[in-house]
Structures are given as structure tokens and as C-alpha cells.
Amino acid sequence: MAMHRDPDFDRFEVVPLTGVLGAEIRGVDLAHDHGPETIAALKAALARHLVLAIRDQNLDPQTLHRVARSFGPFSGNPVHTPLPGLDDIVAFVREPTDRDSVVGDHWHMDLAWMPKPPGIVMLYGETIPPVGGDTCFTSLVQAAKALSPGMRRLLGQLRGVHSARGVYAVNARSGRLGLSGDQRELDRVETLHPVLCAQPETGREYLLINNVMTRFDGLTEAESRPIIDHLLATALRPEFMCRVRWQRGTLLLWNNPLVLHTAIDDYRGYRRVTYRTTVEGWTQVPAQAAD
Ligand SMILES: [Fe+2]
């Protein structure tokens, strides 16, 4: 039986992964076609599905750089050392003998404590284990829809404090990532974002929570924790999730502030190399006050 296709896209094939989140894309060759019409169509597909696994690409870091920059300017990355000559690309390498845990194996948002967290994150599969190492996502758009009117009113008045404390240490532990930031400076970074946000381009509402949100502005950590835990539990319902199985040549991109993601640490003994780049995001905008 043929897979269900999203009928609104005819430039390439868009096959939704679940009823609410993620799609596979086939029939586009980004190394040879990253012109404005293709990029606009991919942005439209991303706006709808939030996570896109573009299959069967043939990119090297230089080509990934060109493709990524046709989506928009680099977001900056205060943590990782980039590839020589390409300041927007980071290589994530895991060797078969590595025994430490995988970087990113917890539910998170990339660089959420930046004043403008990356709007799009792109990860390209260069060397992929035969099985394992999937990436899981959950939709913060669905999480926002699940809130009661009373919780919406409460969250509408709150801003979350997002802390970079410990980010440097986690990345340093992997031993494979060059770090460019200053640990003491990074550990002090705290950024305020509204909790209930609207995406400027689409008006889509999402619940901006993640693992580095330590408290609400004006509340203590002890007061905030039960609400944050409740919101994370809401966001982590299986019906809001999708899971992407990697192949060599898959370009995975996601709308970073609108989802949480986690790496799965189940491929010890295999080599895995991915290249990551990020596209500049936006200043987080509060959703319209609840009715
Ligand atoms: Fe990540």
C-alpha cells in the first residue's frame, strides 16, 4: 500500500510520520537544487510538520553550508568549535570504542538559553550505524493545545528563566567536541522567554519549555518546579511525538523552539558522524492573552 502523502505539496513527496508531527521528504536533491522555490516549499512543509527528514541527499560540509545558508543566516553557536573554514558547521563524532553517554540523550531544545534560540536546526547523517541512534521529537504546539484555560491564563503572565549552567560541562564530558566558549561565562547566562509563545511567521502557538528552564521569573525554583514538571509531562505524551530513523544521507531539520528532541543512546560499537548547523531564529513573542 502506498504511504499517505500530504496532498498540498507537489514539488517533492511529503509523507507524514504521525498524525501531528514530522514528515519524510523524497524527490529533492539539495546539492543540485537549493534555489528559492525549493527552499520556500521546504519552509512551508517545515511550518506544517515541524520536523523534516529529507532522504537520499549527498552533501559534504561545504554543500551543507550552502544549503543551510539558503534557509537563512547562521544563528551563532557560543559552545562548539566549528569545522576549519566553515564557522557554521559542527561535526558530532562518536567512535565505536566510545563508552561515555551520547551528547543530547535527554529531552531538550538546542541553545534555548540564547536570546534568539536557533529557529531551524539541521543535522546531516554522514556515517550512520546500521541500527540505533534514532532521534525522537515531541511537539510543543500540541502541548500548548493541551492546556486548560486556567493554565493558559497563568502561563500568559509568566516568563521562563533559561539557564546555560552546566551546558559546557556536558559537552566537555563527551571528549569529542571542541569547545569555543568560556565555561564560567556560559554558566552565568540566564535568558528570559515568554512561556506561551506565538511563532511570528505563522502565528502558531507553542509552549516554550525545556530542560534548562529552571524557574519562572519572580518565582522561586521550589515554587516553579511542580508546574515545570507538569508542563514537561504534558509535552512528553507519546501522541505528541515522532521518531526518526536515520539513514546515511538523511538531512534532518526541525523548528527548534517548537519541539523538544532527544538522541537515543543505543548504538555502542558503531561509528556515527553527523554535521550540525543552525539558522537564526527570532525573539520569542508571547501568544495573545488568553480569552
Ligand atoms: Fe540537540
Image (spheres, helix red, strand yellow):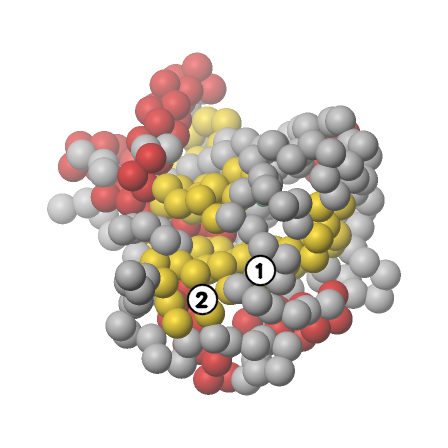
Inspect the image, locate mark 2, and give the three-letter code of the amino acid beneath it.
Ile
Secondary-structure class at tag 1: loop
For residue 131, above or below residue 283:
above
**Front position in the image: 254 or 80:** 254
Q: Residue at x 45, y 66 (%)?
A: 25
Residue 85, which numbered label? none
Q: Is residue 116 rendered to the left or right of residue 179? A: left
Quadrant for the N terminus in the image: bottom left
Q: Position of residue 227 (x, y in %)?
A: 34, 24
For the question of whether residue 247 can be seen, the reply is: yes
For residue 256, above or below residue 216:
below
Residue at mark 1: C-beta within 8 A of ligand 1: no
The residue beneath circle 2 is: 25
Q: Residue at x 75, y 71 (%)?
A: 62
C-alpha span from label 1 to label 2: 10 Å
The residue beneath circle 1 is: 250
Q: Residue lying farthest right?
A: 84
Among numbered discs 1 and 2, the one appearing first in the sequence = 2
Secondary-structure class at tag 2: strand
For residue 204, above or below residue 212:
below
Q: Position of residue 278 (x, y in %)?
A: 61, 59
Q: Position of residue 275 (x, y in %)?
A: 69, 56
Q: Position of residue 214 (x, y in %)?
A: 50, 27
Q: Is residue 51 rendered to the left or right of residue 152? A: right
* Dot 2 crowding, Cα within 10 Å, few <14, some 14–19, many 20+: many
Q: Residue lying farthest left?
A: 291
Inspect the image, locate mark 1, and give the three-letter code of the amino acid beneath it.
Thr
Q: Residue lying farthest front?
A: 1
Residue at mark 2: C-beta within 8 A of ligand 1: no
